[in-house]
């Protein structure tokens, strides 16, 4: 499974990149707004850190305007993936963007049938938000498993991008469910390799070694 960080914070993106584990970045309007920087130059800065795909979301909600925004976004860097919401206008815009040769990540997926629809139209990625389903008492991972089954049944090449991952277990379960990509906040990313027994074990090894050095 590829690891993406779900942030527009360049320090966090650099840190993930320096660990050698960064396959790409997803942003959304809320994450960009938090950084207080000009949108396109921020996306350009992020694209300069990683050569992996960087999702940048359009803000329009009408097909023609969405396509125009998408065309501007792909001019920023060759690794920009346009992000469109799964609404009627977004699906219409997806068809046009795909015909123009763009990679599109369809976002805000909460139903398996939405994932089937965007795959049929040619999305490069589909992003189920599993944490937000868990938040309202539903089973977000079931959505990931259902999408995997649908895509495998019909040989769709649309990448299943598990999003809204809230903790390392979400990442593990998404990998077990066959997600192609997991995108996570940096706070989740940096917990992936941590285990208290590893820290305790190392402390003990070093203490034992120190005893022999007297
Ligand atoms: O960026 C898409 C998604 O990962 C957002 O996650 O935590 O805001 O539900 P969250």
Image (tube, rainbow, N blue to C red):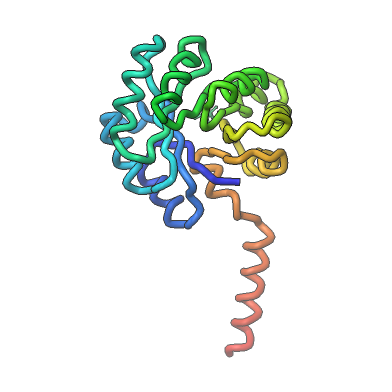
In this picture, is 44 found above or below 214?
above
Within the image, what quadrant is residue 183 found in? top right
- Left or right, 169 with respect to 26, comes to right
Frontmost residue, 177 versus 115: 115
Query: Residue 175's x, y, as percent?
Result: 67, 43
At 54% from the left and 31% from the top, the residue drawn is 125
At 46% from the left and 43% from the top, the residue drawn is 24
In this picture, is 94 found above or below 165?
above
- Figure label count: 0
Within the image, what quadrant is residue 111 found in? top right
At 59% from the left and 22% from the top, the residue drawn is 120
Query: Residue 157's x, y, as percent?
Result: 59, 35
Query: Residue 84's x, y, as percent?
Result: 46, 22
Which residue lies most toward the bottom here?
214
Within the image, what quadrant is residue 112 found in? top right
Frontmost residue, 111 versus 14: 111
Frontmost residue, 165 versus 162: 162
Q: Quadrant of the C terminus?
A: bottom right
Query: Residue 13's x, y, as percent?
Result: 41, 46
In this picture, is 173 found above or below 195?
above
The answer to whether residue 30 of the structure is visible from this angle is no
The answer to whether residue 82 of the structure is visible from this angle is yes
In this picture, is 168 found above or below 155?
below
At 39% from the left and 26% from the top, the residue drawn is 100
- Left or right, 73 with respect to 101, comes to left
């Amino acid at each position: 499974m590829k690891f993406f960080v779900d942030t527009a914070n360049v320090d966090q993106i650099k840190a993930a990149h320096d660990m050698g584990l960064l396959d790409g970045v997803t942003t959304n309007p809320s994450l960009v707004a938090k950084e207080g920087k000009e949108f396109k130059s921020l996306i350009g800065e992020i694209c300069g850190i990683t050569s992996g795909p960087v999702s940048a979301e359009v803000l329009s909600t009408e097909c023609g305007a969405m396509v125009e925004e998408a065309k501007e976004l792909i001019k920023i860097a060759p690794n920009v993936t346009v992000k469109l919401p799964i609404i009627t206008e977004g699906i219409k815009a997806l068809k046009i963007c795909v015909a123009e040769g763009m990679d599109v990540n369809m976002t805000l997926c909460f139903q398996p049938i939405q994932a089937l629809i965007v795959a049929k139209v040619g999305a490069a990625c589909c992003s189920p938000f599993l944490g937000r389903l868990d938040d309202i008492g539903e089973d977000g991972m079931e959505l990931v498993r259902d999408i995997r089954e649908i895509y495998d049944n019909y040989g769709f090449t649309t990448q299943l991008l598990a999003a809204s991952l809230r903790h390392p277990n979400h990442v593990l379960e998404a990998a077990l469910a066959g997600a192609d990509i997991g995108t996570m906040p940096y706070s989740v990313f940096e917990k992936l390799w941590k285990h208290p027994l590893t820290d305790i074990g190392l402390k003990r090894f070093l203490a034992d070694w120190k005893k022999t050095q007297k």
